[in-house]
């Protein structure tokens, strides 16, 4: 007889002991611990390997460029561009200037070249900054040497400029990222804490409302709050609902197939592969061919290009990107429905869940939270990530301005350096923190120690040229700013300017992405020379 159920000697009733928590199988516990450490490792490894592998040294590949003209001379220019080593350019001859501009606005071409009518004239390079500032820069880098080779002067015309409120072109980047995050982050929480909501009949109305709410939040942040988006609310809402819904339904499908491991598949598609292939940070024509293919099929590129079409190109080409998102949404919905009908389970290898009282065991263990807590977490956690990414990053990067960048000024004497600082401060004081330096050696040491961002060296003799010392290893963007500003200063003073990079980036890391995606690097001390 079981002593726990036997009657007491006095004949009274037996009080049953409260049931303890269910005992976890040893194999399940080991698997949970392995997953707890393996999943973050795989996430970081996927992101680091892909981002560094694709963005460390971008170079143009099959960059579509139009040459305006007719006849043997124009055909020779096209042939010369096509013959560039490494398949750098894919050139096309077009008859008129208007045709070339139309191709840029349709984003079939990345740039165009209009040769001068006579030798020694001015060639016009057409770009479209709204299609990507990095792409416009790449076009100039490719076509400017051709103009120099033919002894032409050059003028650059931007046929699709960015809005004043979004000078860096980051609005579509953070809007697209926000839509991807809104689509897949909630599923990781719902899978463990509220699995009963993953039935299609419950999930579809929630996904529709959530997509509309988060799209409105993104538009509100980038529009009225930040000022990077002007109007277009209803169209923006439509794109957002379609993009977020497509990602959410696809993530739901992954969840029905592999359960909690779906977070890895989601991160791989929406973030790891989606960002390099989006063309929203770097031109897609500087990415490997595989990512150029993904640009035409993944949701993040489709959402970003749809927003570009809406905000900057009067809706040109919008339909094809919406079609891509619609295909993802419809295909995922159909497969989810098929999976539910065949298996009858919302999540594989999990017990049926019909209410909030039946969550799955948390990956990290610990007590099960109350349903209200789980509901609040499922809403506030992804919403806080969305606001942080779109709000903080969008607000800080949409209109970059130089403030107090430290720059050393070197003169033949200390007094000359101080006078130069006093003369430059009225026009540059807000942008730069100008500091006189005793010698080039001292300025170079400060630059190497990253105490200053650059050094402007005045001529040592009348009629001589100035020199600008920079360190691209400390940041290519600040080097570009210094070159632009001090080139203008030298021109106003009728001086030639020579630029010297005292700490260049390595040939296999031209963007400095190793330090961006890797661990923090120490300062470049003089002893490193």
Image (cartoon, helix red, strand yellow):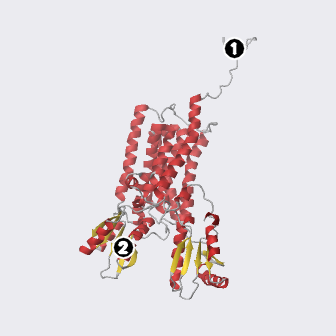
Q: Dot 1, how many residues are within 10 Å of its Cα: few (below 14), some (14-19), or many (20+)? A: few
Q: Residue furthest right?
A: 10
Q: How many marks?
A: 2
Q: Residues within 10 Å of mark 2 (few under 14, many from 20)?
A: some
Q: Residue at x 39, y 36 (%)?
A: 338
- Seen from the viewer's position, the closer of residues 61 and 9 is 61
Instruction: Relative to 416, say whether 305 is above or below.
Output: above
Q: Is residue 82 visible?
A: yes
Instruction: Indicate the position of residue 229 as horizontal and vertical percent values.
Output: 48, 65
Q: Earlier in the sequence, mark 1 or mark 2?
A: 1
Callout 2 secondary element: helix
Q: Tag 1, which secondary structure? A: loop
The image position of residue 321, as x and y in percent, is: 37, 56
Which quadrant would the C terminus be assigned to in this image?
A: bottom right
Relative to residue 113, is residue 44 depicted above or below? above
Disc 1 from disc 2: Cα separation: 95 Å
Which label belongs to residue 297?
A: none
Asked if the residues shown at circle 1 and circle 2 are in contact, with their CB atoms under 8 angstroms apart, the answer is no
Query: Which residue in the protein does label 1 denote?
Result: 3
Residue under label 2: 146
Query: Closer to the camera, 318 or 53?
Result: 53
Q: Nearer the viewer, mark 1 or mark 2?
A: 2
Q: Is residue 463 above or below residue 519?
A: below
């Amino acid at each position: 007889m079981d002593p726990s159920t036997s009657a007491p000697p006095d004949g009274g009733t037996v009080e049953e002991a409260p049931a303890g928590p269910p005992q976890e199988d040893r194999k399940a516990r080991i698997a949970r611990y392995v997953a707890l450490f393996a999943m973050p490792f795989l996430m970081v490894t996927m992101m680091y390997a892909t981002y560094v592998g694709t963005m460390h040294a971008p170079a143009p590949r099959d960059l579509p460029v139009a040459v305006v003209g007719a006849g043997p001379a124009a055909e020779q220019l096209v042939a010369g561009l096509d013959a560039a080593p490494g398949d750098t350019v894919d050139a096309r001859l077009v008859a008129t200037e208007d045709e070339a501009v139309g191709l840029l606005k349709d984003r079939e071409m990345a740039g165009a070249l209009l040769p001068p009518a006579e030798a020694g004239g001015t060639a016009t390079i057409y770009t479209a900054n709204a299609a990507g500032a990095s792409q416009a820069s790449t076009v100039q880098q490719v076509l400017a040497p051709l103009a120099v080779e033919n002894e032409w002067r050059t003028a650059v015309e931007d046929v699709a400029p960015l809005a004043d409120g979004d000078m860096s072109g980051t609005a579509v980047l953070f809007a697209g990222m926000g839509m991807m995050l809104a689509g897949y982050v909630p599923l990781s929480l719902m899978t463990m804490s509220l699995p009963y909501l993953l039935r299609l009949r419950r999930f579809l109305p929630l996904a529709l409302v959530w997509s509309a709410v988060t799209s409105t939040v993104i538009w509100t942040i980038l529009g009225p709050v930040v000022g990077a988006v002007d109007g277009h609310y209803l169209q923006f809402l439509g794109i957002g609902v379609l993009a977020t819904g497509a990602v959410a339904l696809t993530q739901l499908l992954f969840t029905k197939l592999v359960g909690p491991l779906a977070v890895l598949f989601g991160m791989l598609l929406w973030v790891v592969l989606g960002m390099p292939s989006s063309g929203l940070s770097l031109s897609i024509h500087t990415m490997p061919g595989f990512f150029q293919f993904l640009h035409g099929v993944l949701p993040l590129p489709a959402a970003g290009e749809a927003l570009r079409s809406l905000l900057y190109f009067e809706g040109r080409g919008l339909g094809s990107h919406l079609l891509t998102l619609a295909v993802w949404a419809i295909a995922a919905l159909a497969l989810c429905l098929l999976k539910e009908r065949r298996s009858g389970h919302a999540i594989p290898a999990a017990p049926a869940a019909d209410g909030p009282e039946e969550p799955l065991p948390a990956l990290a263990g610990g007590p099960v939270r109350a349903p209200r807590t789980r509901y609040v977490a499922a809403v506030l956690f992804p919403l806080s990530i969305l606001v942080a990414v779109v709000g903080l990053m969008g607000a800080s990067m949409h209109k970059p301005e130089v403030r107090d960048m430290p720059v050393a000024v070197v003169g033949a004497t200390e007094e000359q350096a101080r006078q130069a600082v006093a003369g430059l401060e009225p026009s540059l004081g807000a942008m730069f923190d100008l500091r006189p330096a005793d010698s080039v050696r001292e300025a170079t040491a400060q630059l190497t120690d990253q105490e200053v961002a650059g050094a402007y060296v005045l001529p040592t003799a009348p009629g001589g040229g100035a020199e600008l010392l920079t360190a691209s290893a400390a940041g290519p963007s600040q080097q570009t700013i210094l070159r632009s500003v001090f080139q203008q200063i030298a021109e106003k003073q009728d001086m030639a300017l020579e630029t010297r990079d005292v700490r260049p980036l390595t040939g296999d890391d031209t963007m400095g992405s190793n330090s961006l995606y890797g661990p923090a690097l120490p300062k470049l001390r003089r002893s490193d020379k």
